[in-house]
Image: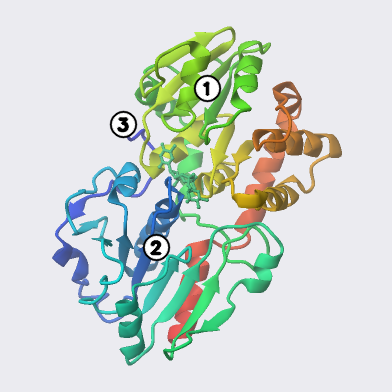
Amino acid sequence: MSSARPPAPSAPPAPSTAPVSAALTPSPSSASTAIAADLFCAVIDNFGDIGVCWRLARQLASEHGWQVRIFVDDLHAFQKLCPTLALDRSRQAVSGIVIEHWREPSRAGATLEVADVVIEAFGCELPHAYVAAMARREQKPVWLNLEYLSAEDWVADFHLRRSPHPRHALTKTFFFPGLGAGTGGVVKERHLDAARAAFEASPPMRDAWWRQATGASAPGADATVVSLFAYENPAVDSLLEQWRDAAAPVVLLVPEGRISGALARFFGLPSFGAGSHAERGNLRAHALAFTDQPGYDALLWASHVNFVRGEDSFVRAQWAARPFVWHIYPQADDAHLPKLDAALEHYGRHLPADARRALAGFWHAWNGAGQPDWADFQRHRKVLERRATDWAQELATLGDLAGNLADFAKSQLK
Ligand code: TRH
């Protein structure tokens, strides 16, 4: 699959690879003050683990002036989000961040200096040699376990809880992202709202995006534009039929991925890879190339309704301030369902009862319970749009995850 970067305005500068030595050498003014952070990320599957870590790393570097290193075990997944990454280098720098290919977990860190702040993403378990080096460090590092996002109430009780190491004189602090007060919040870059506003206010920018992403011009005002990023989903066939038979045109934008096979079957095509287009009834679909992360934001802004999944795209859809549908990451024993309802509890709050029912019904259907009802969802579009805007403002009152994490770490380093 190829990567293309649609024009996302005021996005951070395009990543550039540079010799590691340059990235590790602090500038004279920051040399004595910059906080060094090591972030460890094991990719379980898909793109969410590295997606969250890469955003956090860039934000800690660009907005807080930290010197950041990421240890990641899967450069292929990483390269999808960061096309300039070289797959064959064990150490490189991108956008001033040092990236280490974490090949042998037990040995990583043996030759490295331990940073001031160590972030263990999603319980990935740090290399023993690195933990031992942390324990030997004169000033003990601030050790944070960054957890997965959940909107459940218990998260606020566990956020910033400490856990002493059983053998070493080290303490790990659990840092929980969340959607409610008392949690670490979610990642949001300082430039994000301005970038979205610039995209929304500029017809030439939007036209350029449409041409680059789909090869076509932007659809007319009567069309509903939907982006579709999802896992394999049995409900998609019914939804495609509803869009085909809809009263007004639906333009579907589908990043190439796990749902693409269902699109191919629906349109009777051998595949639905990037660059494909197809039409049935009132439904027109474009398959898009997987982009870097700023490019994905532009896709969300170009759409009226966004289907998102996992963790990071779920968060970006909230900042895009448009109605969205969440395909939550499925877990054993349906452990994900209470998390889905907890998110609905936050997001659906303040909606009139019938709109809340339509939203919850659609989200549940998209996650395996019942059939999605597009007409019902569309009927409440206006009120869902207002709620999406209000919710983005409400969520922003929690502060952003990188800022909250940086403040906490600094308070511990004093
Ligand atoms: O890829 P995901 O399903 O990720 C995950 C992982 O499965 C992970 O193991 C699991 O724990 C977590 O979900 C909950 O969905 P997510 O989190 O939305 O990550 C996708 C990333 O890909 C996100 O950073 C947005 C980015 N992206 C692009 O950069 N360009 C694109 O074209 C698209 C479609 C996505």
| Label ID, residue 1 | 3
- Ligand 1 under 8 Å from disc 3 Cβ: no
Above or below, 181 against 35 in this view is above
Image point (45%, 36%), residue name? 298
The residue sitting at 75% across, 45% down in the picture is 348
The yes-or-no answer for disc 1 within 8 Å of ligand 1 is no
Give the residue at mark 1.
252
Q: Nearer the viewer, residue 376 or 202?
A: 376
Q: Picture coordinates of residue 77 (x, y %)?
A: 34, 46
Q: Residues within 10 Å of mark 2 (few under 14, many from 20)?
A: few
Q: Amino acid at mark 1?
A: Leu
User: Is residue 102 positioned above or below 48 on the image?
Assistant: below
Relative depth, front residue between 221 and 120: 120
The type of residue carrying mark 2 is Glu
Image quadrant holding the C terminus, namely: bottom left
Residue visible at 62% across and 37% down in the picture: 324
Residue 168 visible in this rendered orientation of the protein: yes
* Residue 210 at least partly seen: no
Quadrant including the N terminus: top left
* Residue 407 placement (x, y as % from top left): 49, 74
For marks 1 and 2 on the same chain, the one whose residue lies earlier in the sequence: 2
In the image, 41 versus 292, the foreground residue is 41
Disc 2 on helix, strand or loop?
Answer: helix
Q: Do the residues bearing badges 1 and 2 touch, measured as CB atoms within 8 Å?
A: no
How far apart are labels 2 and 3 at the CA level? Answer: 32 Å
Q: Position of residue 296 (x, y in %)?
A: 43, 38
